[in-house]
Structure formats: C-alpha cells, structure tokens
Amino acid sequence: MNQILITADRLWDGSGAATMQRPVVRVAAGKIDSVEGALLSPATCSGERVDFPGCTILPGFIDTHVHLVMGALDTSAAIIEQIAGDSEAQLLARIEGNARKALSVGLTTVRDCGGTKTHVQQVRDRIRRGEIVGPDILACGSPITTTLGHCHWLGLVADSYEEVERAAQRMLAEDVDFLKVMATGGNMTPTSNPMTAQYNARTLARITEIGRNANKHAAAHVLSQAALASVVAANYRTIEHCDWRVEEWRYEFDPELARRMIDQNQFAGLTMSGFTRRAFDPRLRNLDLPPIKRLDARFACERQMIDFGVRYTLHTDAGVTLCPIEKFALGMRAAEVELKLTPSEVLRAATSSAAEAICLPDRGVLQAGKRADLVVAEGDPTRDLQALENIRAVMKAGVWYHRLPV
Ligand SMILES: [Zn+2]
C-alpha cells in the first residue's frame, strides 16, 4: 500500500489537546493511518516522505456557511444584480472558481448555505468525480424563503405550510445534503425585515421533520429573537448567525433558550463576514452601516452565549459583501479579536466543532482512521493565527492539492 509520511515541527490535532512536537503523520488509502510523536527511522518509510520544517500540521478547515455563487462585491445590490444578470455558464464558473480558491487556503470542506438552482450540486459532483479541483461541498440548493423574503432572488419562494413542504421535498429531489430556511429576514434583502419571523413555529418544525425523514440535517438563518425560540424548538442542527437581537439596537441573551440549545446539542453558527474584520481593515470602521454599528453589542451577546456553554462554529458567510472566500484566515483572526477567543478555540470552531455541527464524523481531527484532510501552515497558528495566511500545503482525502516549497 502506498504510504505518505509527513513531518513538521508541530501538530495540532483539532481536539483541543496540546500541540504535539516533531509529529509524524502516516497517510494511506486516503485516511490517516497514524499520528506519532517521534520520528520514525527511514527504513519504515515505504512511500513518499514530505518534511515541513518550521511548520504546523492541522486538520483541514471547514467553513460551515459560504455562498459559492456570490461574488463578494462591495454592495449587496451589486451581488444580487450580478447573479440576476449572469448566464448559467457564468454562475457555474464563479462557483468553480470560489471552490478552487477555498481549497487553496486550506478549506477541505465547505457547506454552501444558498445558491441558484442545482448549480452548487453540479460543482460538488464534478469535484467528487475528480473533474475539477475543490473542497468537499455540502449543498442546500437554495434556501427556503418567502415572497420578497431574505434571498428570494435565489429562487426558492414558499409562503404557506404546504408550499414550504413542497419546497423542502423539491430540494431533496434535487439531491441536496441539508435543508436551509430563512427563518427571519436578512440584511442583504431590503424587502425583508431581520426583526420579523418569516415562518411560524409549525412550518419551521415541518422542515426539520422532512429533513430527519431523509436523514439530512437542517440549518436556519436567524437574525433576531423573532424566530429563535421556534428554531430551537424545531431542533435545527445549526442556527446560522444566531442573533439574540430583540430590538433594532438591543441584544438580550436568553439563558433558558441557550440551555435548551445545549441539551439538544445544537450549534450556533457565528458569522465572521467582511464587516466583522474591522480590526484589520480601516475602510470598514468608517462605513456608516447598521450591521457595523451593532457589532459591539452583537459580540458582547455572543461572548455571553459562549461563556454559558452553547456550542458554536465560526463561519465566514463567504461571498457576501467584502467577503471573498480566500480571506478565510482574516475571518478567523477577527473572531479571536472580537470574541476574545484563544487561537486554539478559534481553530477548534473551524475544525472538530464544525465537523460535528454539520454531521461529518469522518473529519475535523487528525486521528487514526479519519479522512486525511490536512493543512500545513508556516509557523505556529496555535500561538498566532496570522500563520493561517501562510498555508504551505493542503491535502484532501490523502491527495495533495496544493504544495509550495518550504
Ligand atoms: Zn449566508
């Protein structure tokens, strides 16, 4: 059996355990065969051996919320207009391009939270067949939303209980990996209102039920408490954004709801999109936009939620305004600053916690038997997340996709 032996200065395995010094990772048949802490004698190498002095080996990163079809332009209006004006070929080309960029920065898995028609599934399948290069993609097709509701321009409008049922069934027929609903309005769509629920509790519960019957998880977009209680009650696996806003400028953490989220092992998907990177981009600090002006209150509430013990992932919402997918590292660095997390906590949210949140038990940690999805970063990202901006190598399922000379 052809083996690959990888060595580096250190390894962080995704579980949160201490960094291992002088690791040797043995990969065979697309999986991790072993992770050991002492250098083996050369005689035991039967295949390729690759050394990364000065580097750290980590699990491949997982972004649990991206939009591969979106162009990360300067305004939401421009993004919407671009999608409306593009041909099928242009939409597919953008999805493919974003997928390629994602893999090059270390994302070996992304969950696409809303695209057009079956385009994301088509790209997912082409990657799976080895025709093009990209991360593993989990697709929801389009998100279920109301007439003129959040992201209605992606094309899956359903208002009544029966229409929502049909929309969810249609997504399953179009071979999606999970279901996504816009439970409240969103900032991107001016005809929608983030402060109001788009569906009642019964309708939201029907979506998770349809998903469960097909063995698929479900994700709900929640930008205020108007829908949070019913999304928790319906046991959505991931609550995207998980905003605790009760009024335009006021956030209010609810320990009772949070307790239920913990009991049901639900995950909050915390959004580190373009606006949140204000610490690294002076241009953003000067923008007079409500989502930016609300950031301090939002992060304070999210920190409360983390301290309470709610499980979370950190995602970028890549594709939205000023948020290109290749800037993944900047989103993670912003989480460290804004949510006062340690680098290891940030990394866990984008590896092992992310894998668990989106129901992929075969990845997210570097342990024997797991898929060989790994990233080699120059330096030590467990001390300084800026190291994520210097990715030396990316392996997905035992295959090198991107390897720069050290
Ligand atoms: Zn989104």
Image: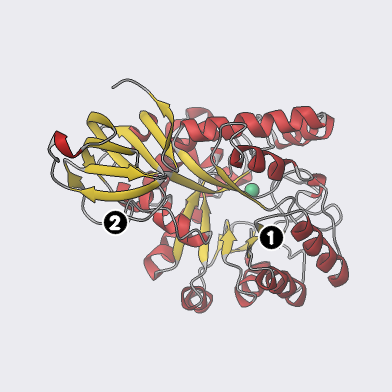
Going 58% across and 62% down the picture, which residue do you hit?
239
The amino acid on which the numbered mark 2 sits, given as a three-letter code, is Gly
Query: Residue furthest toward the front?
Result: 1
- Image coordinates of residue 175 in percent, x first then y, are 72, 54
Does the rendering let one see residue 243?
A: no
Q: Is disc 2's CB within 8 Å of ligand 1?
A: no
Between residue 367 and residue 244, name the one nearer to us.
367
Nearest to the observer: residue 51 or residue 382: 51
In this picture, is 146 found above or below 38? below
- Which residue is tagged 1? 179
Residue 299 badge: none
| Residue bearing the label numbered 2 | 16
Q: Position of residue 252 (x, y in %)?
A: 53, 67
Q: Residues within 10 Å of mark 1 (few under 14, many from 20)?
A: many
When the figure is inspected, residue 252 is found, relative to residue 36, above or below; the finding is: below
Q: Earlier in the sequence, mark 2 or mark 1?
A: 2
Q: Secondary structure at mark 2?
A: loop
Q: Quadrant of residue 378?
A: top left
Side of 56 relative to 141 (left or right): left
Which residue is depicted at the point 84% across and 71% down?
A: 161
In the image, taking residue 223 as reference, residue 47 lies left or right, namely left
Q: In what quadrant of the picture does the N terminus appear?
A: top left
Q: Tell me, what colour scheme is on the image? A: secondary structure
